[in-house]
Image (tube, rainbow, N blue to C red):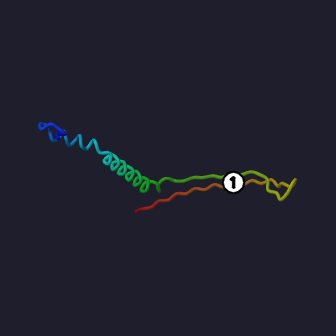
Amino acid sequence: MMLVTANEDVATLLSLALAAHPELDEAMAHAAAASTAEHGATRGPLVPTIGAVASVGGLGGGAGTTAPGHDFDASSDYEFALN
């Protein structure tokens, strides 16, 4: 049984074989994901995080008894790590 002709170029056959393996695409995707994760782990601590929370409502213990209340909180976080 002959799958290819005898005069096929080896380089052509190798490129066809490599293109036919989805495992290579999967491995390249894993490598790209690892590179992205490394970039985030090394550069992520240099980005500050800022958050704010606000709430307004009544604080009461029963029907018809509401005490007006409000709360506001702001925070920031900045980390600089040298590895």
Left/right placement of residue 44 relative to residue 74 reads: left
Q: Quadrant of residue 65?
A: bottom right
Residue 78, given in percent of the width and then of the height, sits at 52, 57
Q: Nearer the viewer, residue 79 or 60?
A: 60
Q: Quadrant of residue 66?
A: bottom right
Q: Quadrant of the C terminus?
A: bottom left
**Residue at (33%, 50%) from the top-left corner?**
27
Q: Secondary structure at mark 1?
A: strand
Q: Nearer the viewer, residue 57 or 8?
A: 8
**Residue at (16%, 39%) from the top-left corner?**
2
The amino acid type, in three-letter code, at marker 1 is Phe
Residue 50, given in percent of the width and then of the height, sits at 57, 52
Left/right placement of residue 52 relative to residue 23 reads: right
Q: Quadrant of the N terminus?
A: top left
Residue lying furthest right: 64
Q: Name the residue carrying label 1.
A: 72
Q: Is residue 30 above or below residue 11?
A: below
**Residue at (38%, 53%) from the top-left corner?**
34
